[in-house]
Amino acid sequence: MSDVYAARRGLLRDRCAAAGNAAALITRPANVRYLSGASPLGAVLLVGSSEDVLLCGSPPTGDVDEGRLDERLRVSVLAHSGGDPAVAAADLAAAARADSLAVEEHHLTVGRHRALRSVAPKLRLTDLGTAVEQQRLVKDEEEIACLRIAAEIADQALGELLESILVGRTERHLALELERRLVDHGADGPAFPTSVGTGPNSGRSRHRPSDRRVEEGDFLSVCLGATYRGYRCEIGRTFVIGTSPADWQIELYDLVFAAQRAGRETLVPGAAYRDVDHAARSVLDSAGHGEALAAWTGHGVGLEIDEDPQLAPTAMGKLDACVPVTVEPGVHLPGRGGVRIDDTLVVRPEADGGPELLTITTKELLAL
């Protein structure tokens, strides 16, 4: 993997040089990890013309959450605790006689930006923009393998929950159990706070679990994800509790399933982001649910659970092969509940079989 990280930094270095920047300061943790293999708490990465340095306030611990650091990378631990590694990086760049430094303005605070200017007043600060995020869009096969394992773990945790007794248990209890099962099966931890919604809470996007108890006849919607070696996946499913579903539940479920399938079938290289969104959204809109729909139908995943691309009505850009995304339409009927169906997939050419489905738990409307 050292060669992979070095190649990623080399690509960024070439981009900086082409823009007239002598060095780049990476402060966003996911970007630090992408370029160095690890992201110790508070660490920053200085990508220079001749040397790359990871600066941190304390020695890396080697925890799973931090990742595995590229052994070729020089690590500089600040001599004085409490110092800002970003300020130290700017000082290091100035000492190396760099005339400019590209920074992630979308991540730096105003106060931190001022501190960089004060320690290196002759250093010209420019905006790196989302250059690293754009590099992260297309995943290599090792990254996809991590996502695939994360999806398998999430599928296992969800499958085990479905085999247990659910009636009478609270949303909060079920969410905590799912997160424990993720770790039991080898996850670093949950990819995001697990959402469990029952009855009138079901189908709500990013619902925070409450003390409401599961009842017979409820819709139960679950959205969870696992993190494996830093890579995060997402799955969402909806079920009926303890009885045959009512006609309105079957009708609503079939509608959301059709919308989700339409979005999945659009995931081919060259498809516009907004066309994927439109494929799923139009199915629900035509049934009269347009006003209640979320601002997007899906998004990219990777080292963060919500990455580019955004699959939204006004999103600009087209999909590439090997880009992992979610497709997650849903409908919530106030006071009654609703349905969400969410998968993580990898965009693949039709010649390779089309989109690769990573989350494989059944999408049949089960009565549990």
Image (tube, rainbow, N blue to C red):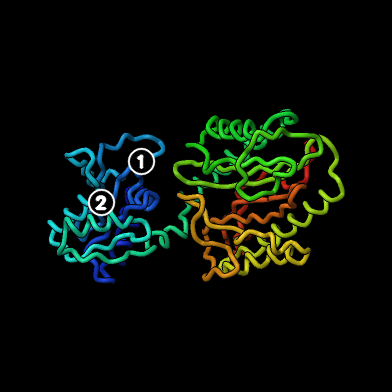
Q: Position of residue 278 (x, y in %)?
A: 66, 67
Q: Position of residue 200 (x, y in %)?
A: 73, 44
Q: Who's the residue at 82% across and 53% down the image?
A: 251
* Disc 1 secondary structure class: loop
* Disc 2 secondary structure class: helix
Would you say 162 lies left or right of 250 here? Answer: left
For residue 68, the mark is 1
Q: Nearer the viewer, residue 201 or 364?
A: 201
Q: Looking at the rendering, in which quadrant would you find the C terminus? A: top right
Q: Who's the residue at 17% across and 55% down the image?
A: 119
Q: Position of residue 139 (x, y in %)?
A: 47, 56
Q: Who's the residue at 17% across and 66% down the image?
A: 99
**Circle 1: is it few (<14), some (14-19), or many (20+) Cα within 10 Å?**
some
Quarter of the image for residue 90 reads bottom left
Residues under numbered marks 1 and 2 in contact, where contact means CB atoms less than 8 Å apart? no
**Mark 2 residue type:** Ala
Residue 36 is at least partly visible in this image:
yes
Quarter of the image for residue 266 reads bottom right
Q: Earlier in the sequence, mark 1 or mark 2?
A: 1
Q: Nearer the viewer, residue 152 or 280?
A: 280
Work out how far the residue at label 1 is from the one at label 2, CA to CA, in angstroms. 21 Å
Q: Position of residue 174 (x, y in %)?
A: 64, 33
**Mark 1 residue type:** Arg
Q: Who's the residue at 37% across and 40% down the image?
A: 66
What count of labels does the image hold?
A: 2
Would you say 355 lies left or right of 216 here? Answer: left
For residue 319, the mark is none
Would you say 156 lies left or right of 50 here? Answer: right
Residue 4 is at least partly visible in this image:
no
Residue 153 drawn above or below residue 303:
above
Reading the image, the residue beneath label 2 is: 86
